Every structure is written in C-alpha cells, then in structure tokens.
Image (spheres, rainbow, N blue to C red):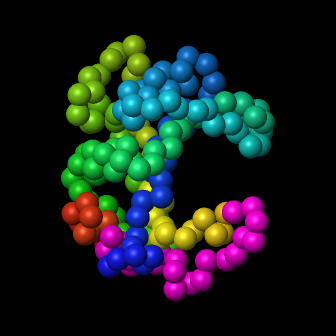
Amino acid sequence: MAGMREIRIEKVVVNVGVGEAGEKLVKAQKVLELVTKQKSVQTLSHQAVRDWGVRRNMPIGTRVTLRGDAADVFLKAALEIRNNRLPGYSFDPRGNVSFGIQDYTDFPGMKYDPEVGVFGMDVAVSLQRPGFRIARRAVRARKIPRRHRVSREEGMTFMKDRYKVEVVE
C-alpha cells in the first residue's frame, strides 16, 4: 500500500477525567505530563450537573494530544500494557480506536507515589489517509469520499499489521 491510500495515525489523545478542579486535577496533569513527556491542557465541562456539583466551564479533566513520532512511541507503550490485545468494540465505524489504561504505574519507569494516588486514562487513536485536510481547510472545504475514509475493518487491519495487536471479538 503506497501513496494516498496509506493509512496513518493522525493523532493520539490521552485523557484523564477527574470530575473536579483543585489539587486532584493538578496531580492528574502532573501524571499525564510524566507519562507523555508533553504539556497537558485542562478540559472544561460543557454543562452543569447539579448532582455531581459540576458547574459550566469548570475544569474537570486534563488531556494531551500526541502526533508524529511521540504518538507512535506512546501508543506502543500503551498497547504493551494491554498485552497488545484490544476488544473489537474498541473500533468505531471510521476505523478509530479507543481503550483505557487502569493505572499510570503500568508504564515503564513510573513508580507509585502515595501523594499522587492512582490515575487511569483513556487513549483515543485517530486514523486517516493523506488528504483529509480538505475536509478541515477554510477555503474550498470538501467532503472526504467514502472510498477514501478509513473503515472499521481497515482500522483493525492497520493495528494488527503495524502494532501486532490481537483483536478479541
């Protein structure tokens, strides 16, 4: 497979939902920055949920977007923790894949710190082919034809070939 049909990783987004602002969120950001070696940003709530004590635009989580080699290196480490096994339902119709990691201490070189506690994270991998900028550009934006989009099966095949992932149905 060569040229414009080649599937590649657009980005890997690592997300920790804390559910509250304050010290816990700062610790989660620190953990995410240690694991990804990149600066994290806070995520804000979109709506108020009274029962949980969440107000609109309140910082409730943190995330990091990785691209290029950094995304590749992180994804290899994250899949290693999952024993290179992903359930079939992790793949969406566009070929993207998402999975969770229970504890950040599973990453190589990470030690458990009683002051920080346990933080899990969600990892979302976005796949695409070259030319997807056409859908996002400001001038003359167009739709991506169906034949050029990444299907669920193609996403699974890509993960199997590139990262030796075993898809468990």
Which is more toward the observer, 3 or 92? 3
Task: Indicate whether 62 appears above or below 147.
Answer: above
Q: Residue at x 53, y 38 (%)?
A: 63
* Figure quadrant of the C terminus: bottom left
Do we see residue 89 in this rendering?
A: no
Which is more toward the observer, 141 or 109? 141
Q: Position of residue 143 (x, y in %)?
A: 67, 77
Q: Which residues are magenta?
A: 137-158
* Figure quadrant of the N terminus: bottom left
Q: Residue at x 70, y 39 (%)?
A: 45
Is residue 47 part of the magenta span, yes or no? no
Q: Position of residue 61 (x, y in %)?
A: 58, 34
Q: Position of residue 43 (x, y in %)?
A: 63, 37
Q: Position of residue 9 (x, y in %)?
A: 42, 60
- Total number of numbered discs in the rendering: 0
Is residue 138 part of the magenta span, yes or no? yes
Do we see residue 141 in this rendering?
A: yes
Q: Residue at x 21, y 63 (%)?
A: 164
Give left or right: position of 84 versus 17.
left
Q: Could you say which quadrant of the image residue 141 lies in?
A: bottom right
Give left or right: position of 25 versus 48.
left
Which is more toward the observer, 143 or 121? 143
